Amino acid sequence: MSSLTLSNITASYGKTPVVTGVSAAFAAGRLTVLAGPNGCGKSTLLRTIMGFLPDIRGDVSLDGQPVTKIGRRMLARRIAYLAQESSCPDYMTLGELVELGGYARYSLMGGPSDRDRQLFREALETVGLADKAHLPVNTLSGGQRQRAWIAMVLAQDTDIVLMDEPVNHLDVKYQYAVLSLVRALVRNHCKTVIMVLHDLNLAAAFADDIILMKAGRILASGPVPSTVTSENVARVFDLEAEVFPREGRLVFLPRLPSSEAASP
């Protein structure tokens, strides 16, 4: 399994840094969630890992090698990235979408190998869409489309997977279904997953580790049970909340302002 580390990362879109002095090491074979207020730099950190930003200072290393020294094609064989918003042409079928996941492995003049095609079938079976490969992606339901994109990521067959809000726009049922699938990828396929989530209850239910960010910096990080605390939530979100165990996981319960609290 590959190891990924960030050392004193500062990243900007223009003159103003969005992420400042961030260092982190992501444990292999674990699900790490990046959480924090809107605009705190979570998505930027994922794009920084992929080298998508023009102005990056510090070091991103994969197995001790700077990612800047790894070619784009080779990087795609080692790290998969699922953006927050994904789209494809109306004519593209699910099978064709999943085949894109193997593109980095194809030879210059060749197409998918027998091994690639096996990976495509396994990816569709893993997300429960093996019988829908012939259907256009855009005719699938919201939950199915999100699983389709995860299948494409699986077909990329990388040790590390980056996901930016993979349950964005999904209702509660499909949020839990998709995150249960991701959790199974970590447990059964030994994937290292780094995911942006806004919902602390979802993070507490599915993540192994969590990194809490605010204003482009990391304020707290570590295993979920020791990091998702009332004190850390107050520091990061400026919000009073109770955090308590329930049925083997932590529950995050914000306190309503006194003016909004329900009358007895």
Image (cartoon, rainbow, N blue to C red):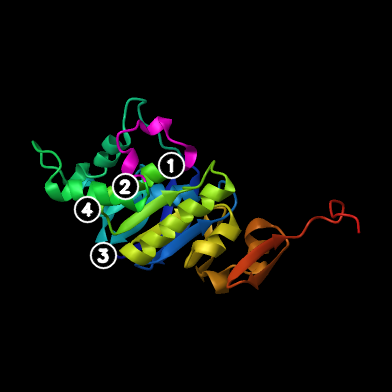
Query: Upstream in the sequence, badge 1 or badge 3?
Result: 3
The residue lying at 43 percent from left, 53 percent from top is 10
Check residue 135 for magenta coloring. Answer: yes
Does the rendering let one see residue 156?
Answer: no
**What residue would you read off at disc 4?**
69
Helix, strand or loop at mark 1: helix
**What residue would you read off at disc 1?**
144
**Which three-letter amino acid code belongs to the residue tagged 2?**
Leu
The residues tagged by marks 1 and 3 sit, at their Cα atoms, a distance apart of: 34 Å
Highlighted magenta segment, given as a residue range: 129-144
**Which three-letter amino acid code belongs to the residue tagged 4?**
Lys
Q: Viewed as shown, does residue 175 lie left or right of 146?
A: right
**Which three-letter amino acid code belongs to the residue tagged 1?**
Gln
The residues tagged by marks 4 and 2 sit, at their Cα atoms, a distance apart of: 33 Å
The residue lying at 62 percent from left, 59 percent from top is 236
The residues tagged by marks 1 and 4 sit, at their Cα atoms, a distance apart of: 36 Å
